Image (cartoon, helix red, strand yellow):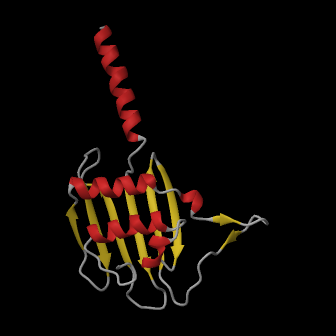
Amino acid sequence: MNIKVLFLVYFTFYNYCFSQNKFEKLELNHSNSIIIGSHVKITIEPVKIGKQRMKIAVESKKKNNYSRNLSKKEYAAIEEAVLKFNPKILYIISDNGKDTLTTNCIDGYSTDMTIFKNNKKETYFINCLSKMDNYKKKRKDFWYVAKLIFEAGNVRLKELED
């Protein structure tokens, strides 16, 4: 009896600890409102609920929609980058309490990432995502996550290429 209780406590603790560090689903949207048909939506989610295997689905008007299973290596790289991502440095709050815009561009792309983790939904948004963001301290983590997701989805974007 004590062994069953001990096993149950261990199993619950183990699941709790490791479920805190994983995302349940991730969505990335990339579009330009000026260019018709430029919207790309990439979703990463489990193949089946409760399974460790993840699939990536790409929806685009320019390309055919498709999905495939992610390799463990691809998923591990994306998961590590998502968990490393610090949204607090992405947005700067000015002295008057308003969000400040740190990057300006004309007709730039909008990119948003929604992370579903621990039954919570967090959405982060960046305008004008480009390869130069790799060199900006505040935007490089977001850029890196987006780049990994686009590569995993076999989506080539000229504004993110080196």
The one nearer the camera, 63 or 162, is 162
Residue drawn 48% across and 71% down? 135
Q: Quadrant of the N terminus?
A: top left
- The image shows residue 149 at horizontal and vertical percentages of 33, 66
Q: Is residue 109 above or below residue 82?
A: below
Residue drawn 44% across and 57% down? 115
Residue 82, quarter of picture: bottom left
Q: Is residue 52 above or below residue 140?
A: above
Tally of numbered tags:
0
Residue furthest to the front: 135
Q: Is residue 18 left or right of residue 141?
A: left
Q: Quadrant of the C terminus?
A: bottom left
Residue furthest to the right: 96
- The image shows residue 45 at horizontal and vertical percentages of 31, 57
Residue furthest to the top: 1
The one nearer the camera, 149 or 31, is 149
- The image shows residue 22 at horizontal and vertical percentages of 38, 47
Q: Is residue 5 left or right of residue 66?
A: right
Q: Is residue 56 above or below residue 10?
A: below
Q: Is residue 161 left or right of residue 101?
A: left
Q: Is residue 63 above or below residue 66?
A: below
Residue drawn 43% across and 91% down? 35
The one nearer the camera, 59 or 77, is 77
Q: Is residue 131 left or right of residue 59?
A: right
- The image shows residue 32 at horizontal and vertical percentages of 46, 85
Residue 31, quarter of picture: bottom left
